[in-house]
Amino acid sequence: MKHLFILLLCLPLWGLAQQQQANYICPPCGRACDSIIHHAPGVCAHCGMALMPKDTAKPVTYSICFYLYDGTEVLDFAGPMEVFSYAGFKIFTVGKTKAPVTVQGILKVIPDYSIADAPPANYFAIFGGDDGIATNDPEVISWIKKRDATTEGYFSVCTGAFVLGKAGLLDGLTVTTFHNSIQNLQGAVPSAKVLNNVRYVDNGRVITTAGISAGIDGALHLVARLRGEEAALRIAKHMEYDKYVPEQGMQVKR
Amino acid sequence: MKHLFILLLCLPLWGLAQQQQANYICPPCGRACDSIIHHAPGVCAHCGMALMPKDTAKPVTYSICFYLYDGTEVLDFAGPMEVFSYAGFKIFTVGKTKAPVTVQGILKVIPDYSIADAPPANYFAIFGGDDGIATNDPEVISWIKKRDATTEGYFSVCTGAFVLGKAGLLDGLTVTTFHNSIQNLQGAVPSAKVLNNVRYVDNGRVITTAGISAGIDGALHLVARLRGEEAALRIAKHMEYDKYVPEQGMQVKR
């Protein structure tokens, strides 16, 4: 009887302790703070994103391979890299070899992998710029084709679409590319329907975006598809890309 | 008389030849195509920008130093790099040392220079992310101060403003930073007026921008100031950043 009395006395204290021990995490952002457990709601001091109760978080991890070549347009890949990073994607870069790649003629980047040792990824991303370096390289095109069996989806920005086209991945699809290259892509992939004046086109397995900055919108769209529109809008707000408009691209009916 | 007749006969042909020899160049974009002379109007096959008559082009070259540290936000610097590249700026990157810098926890970048050998530049640019790595490094702050005599202007994106603040460059100015860091910057630089809800603030010598993607707008604004609004709008259109709105930032009256 005495023990039951003590137990009843302790119950409210136990409840209070449980409440105080509620755990919060920041939305998966691919950084060190992903592993930090916070014991009160608020904002992550590291990445600045609003904390969420740990139990409601579902950190499914998607991997994405960023193929970079000399002359890749810097914003083409950096915009999506920023978006996918905050969406908790595991991002890695691949060059033809492991030698540094100079993007935009300026930035020297060391690829994580070469085409000889790059692991598979859920998504394969390719970007514009001097895209002929990749499009006209049979080894690179062959490597992309070989990965197809383990690649769930493709994501191209700007003239990166020409690389996917050369690999036969745009045949029969509705797609887009850089505004000055619409006709050229139509010539390169006659069976595709190449649209102008659209930020991105989502065919399900293949997303192509318009030029340079449109990669940001396409990446936010992919995040919306995988994690929900709320997640995409939260990232857009965090990036102060307050101009992101859901559904501004085109979703091809399947 | 016979010679005069031949001369008169040849004049129209000479005029035609002159017309055919008219020279065109692409707007300076910092790439190899800057040196190509075209003999007909149209679009540069390399960078896709509309060609302009060579005589009307005034390719003043500005240099800009991009300081990068581990944890720099990738879009913070890549957006302005894209803009300044098309504006023909000479861009170089600097790390504390020449060791590779990992930006966004993902991208391995080899800096062009270290703080020991970086040349002077017209502009000094600094970006957000794990900015404490630079802000709390006395050697880096001292190096920025030492360059002040040869630096015409400063450009910060996001929490890069904290680095400029630590170097005493924001004292008494109206500035902005990442939306979650407004109060912190006000605390760090009490004499500054830190604004929220503005894409960028231009004090003349110092431009600070809001978070991450706002660096694109701030860079376009600087290009507009140096090369005219038409040049900025041409670059924005080329980048398909059709959402750039001139005067969306704040110009502090001088």
Image (cartoon, coloured by chain):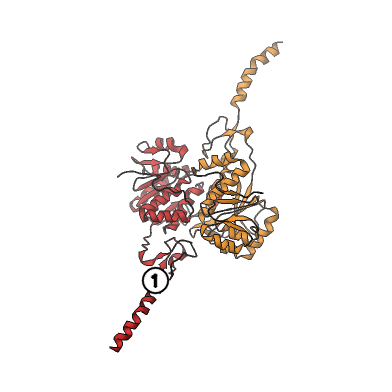
Chain colours: A orange, B red
Residue furthest out toward the right: A1
Can residue B222 be seen here? The reply is yes
Q: Residue B138 versus residue A78: which sits nearer the camera?
A: A78
At 66% from the left and 62% from the top, the residue drawn is: A142
Please give left or right for residue B127 compared with residue A228 in the image.
left
According to the image, label 1 marks what residue?
A: B22
Classify B53 as above or below B62.
below
Q: Quadrant of the C terminus of chain B?
A: top left
Q: Tell me where residue B198 sits by quadrant.
A: top left
Q: For the residue marked with disc 1, what is the amino acid?
A: Ala
Please give left or right for residue A49 compared with residue A190 in the image.
left
Count of all numbered marks drawn on residues in the image: 1
Give the secondary structure at mark 1: loop
- Residue A210 locus on image (x, y percent): 54, 54
- Residue B167 locus on image (x, y percent): 38, 44
Q: Residues within 10 Å of mark 1 (few under 14, many from 20)?
A: some
Residue furthest out toward the left: B1
* Image mark 1: chain: B
At 38% from the left and 62% from the top, the residue drawn is: B59
Classify B135 as above or below B229.
above
Can residue A84 be seen here? The reply is no
At 43% from the left and 37% from the top, the residue drawn is: B182
Residue furthest out toward the top: A1
Q: Quadrant of the N terminus of chain B?
A: bottom left
Classify A185 as above or below B5.
above
Please give left or right for residue A122 compared with residue A178 in the image.
right
Q: Tell me where residue B250 sits by quadrant.
A: top left
Q: Residue B185 versus residue A202: which sits nearer the camera?
A: A202
- Residue B181 locus on image (x, y percent): 45, 38
